[in-house]
């Protein structure tokens, strides 16, 4: 089956499965499902792809990826920040900076991982899971196996976090709203934050989603800062300090601003969000289709150990940071 037919089918199937209540309660969003389905299909596909298949796959991983991230901006608004206060914004910013900085340092210096694996895994843990890995990949331009390994780790530990937080709530000594802030500022994926918050109360769910979306919104300045840092580190080398400007980030910011300033009709807003998810799911399906299980196995235990350390930092370090910055 040609990939211009196969990949949309995989993406649509992932979206459909993610909308089912049993799957939604497990915290599996369309993006992880798309890469899993793509990997399953790719495992049984031993046919060498033709030129058209490769072109369409590249189109999904580059153009549609960036377009999906831009459209993702319509899921956010500036009002969501003001609803939970500046403390939540500060908390998210500190979490992202700490997890990414420490994770990258440990990954490169201690575990001797490839730079791209350390950066992608740390970005996924720090911000919003698979979506952050995809956005970072657009700037970093790493090998496909590095992206696959990073996505696998954040999906694994994000899922573990989702099941752990309802148990932690019984001993946390936090109010429902404060615990929602804790969930939103430390859980990997949006869908996982929804599942964890919903298992406690409606108030916890609402607060967790808002704080998590603020964390997602910080993806834009993160990508700009990362791109700037990569530019400086590349000066004087083979690329001659060529400036990498992630233009799609400005589109993401513009979409968020439009959603904040304009009264966009709900049906159109729903369509834009659905289109964003479909584009991102296509990118993940394309990535999964070209990924083999042996690739992740060859990466060894070090990426998993790094993701485990970041998971524990988010859970325990994030808890004490919440107690420090947020009034329970």
Image: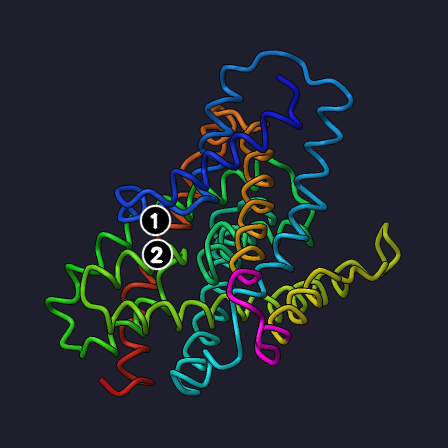
Residue shown at 59%/30% (left/top)? 7
Of 27 and 222, the residue lying toward us:
27
Where is residue 166 shown, x and y percent of the image? 18, 60
Mark 2, Cα crowd under 10 Å, few <14 / some 14-19 / many 20+, is many
If the image is split into quadrants, where does the C terminus sit? bottom left
Q: Which residue is painted at 84% across and 54% down in the image?
A: 237
Picture layout, residue 274 above or below residue 37: below
The reply, left or right, for residue 126 in relation to residue 245 is: left
Q: Is residue 174 left or right of residue 120?
A: left
Q: Which mark is residue 328?
A: none
Pointer 2: what residue? 311
Q: Is residue 141 left or right of residue 202?
A: right
Say what secondary structure mark 1 lies in: helix
Are there few (<14), some (14-19), or many (20+) residues within 10 Å of tag 1? Answer: many
> Left or right: 2 with respect to 128?
right
Residue 120: percent from the left, percent from the top?
55, 51
Instruction: Locate residue 257, reporting x and y percent.
Output: 63, 76
Marks counted in the figure total 2
Residue bearing mark 1: 157
* Distance from Cα at disc 1 to Cα at disc 2: 6 Å
Determine contact: label 1, label 2, CB under 8 Å: yes
Residue 313: % across, % down: 34, 63
Magenta-colored segment: predominant secondary structure: helix
Quadrant of the image containing the N terminus: top right
Q: What span is colored magenta in the figure?
A: 258-269
């Amino acid at each position: 089956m040609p990939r211009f037919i196969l990949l949309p089918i995989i993406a649509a199937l992932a979206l459909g499965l993610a909308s089912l209540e049993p799957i939604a309660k497990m915290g599996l969003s369309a993006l992880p499902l798309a890469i899993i389905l793509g990997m399953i299909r790719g495992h049984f596909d031993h046919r060498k792809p033709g030129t058209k298949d490769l072109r369409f796959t590249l189109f999904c991983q580059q153009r549609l990826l960036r377009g999906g991230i831009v459209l993702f901006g319509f899921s956010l608004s500036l009002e969501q920040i003001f609803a939970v206060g500046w403390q939540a914004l500060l908390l998210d910013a500190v979490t992202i900076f700490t997890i990414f900085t420490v994770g990258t340092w440990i990954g490169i210096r201690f575990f001797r991982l490839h730079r791209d694996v350390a950066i992608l895994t740390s970005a996924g843990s720090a911000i919003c899971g698979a979506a952050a890995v995809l956005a970072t990949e657009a700037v970093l331009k790493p090998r496909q196996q590095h992206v696959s390994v990073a996505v696998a780790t954040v999906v694994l530990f994000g899922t573990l976090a989702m099941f752990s937080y309802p148990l932690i709530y019984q001993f946390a000594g936090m109010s429902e709203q404060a615990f929602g802030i804790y969930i939103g500022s430390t859980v990997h994926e949006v869908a996982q934050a929804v599942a964890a918050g919903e298992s406690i109360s409606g108030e916890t769910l609402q607060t967790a989603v808002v704080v998590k979306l603020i964390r997602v919104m910080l993806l834009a300045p993160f990508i700009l800062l990362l791109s700037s840092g990569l530019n400086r580190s590349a000066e004087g080398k083979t690329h001659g300090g060529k400036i990498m400007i992630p233009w799609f980030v400005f589109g993401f910011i513009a979409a968020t601003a439009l959603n904040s300033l304009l009264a966009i009709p709900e049906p159109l807003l729903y369509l834009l969000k659905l289109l964003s998810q479909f584009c991102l799911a296509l990118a993940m399906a394309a990535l999964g289709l070209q990924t083999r299980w042996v690739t992740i196995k060859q990466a060894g235990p070090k990426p998993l150990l790094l993701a485990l350390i970041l998971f524990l930092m988010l859970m325990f370090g994030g808890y004490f940071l919440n107690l420090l910055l947020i009034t329970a």
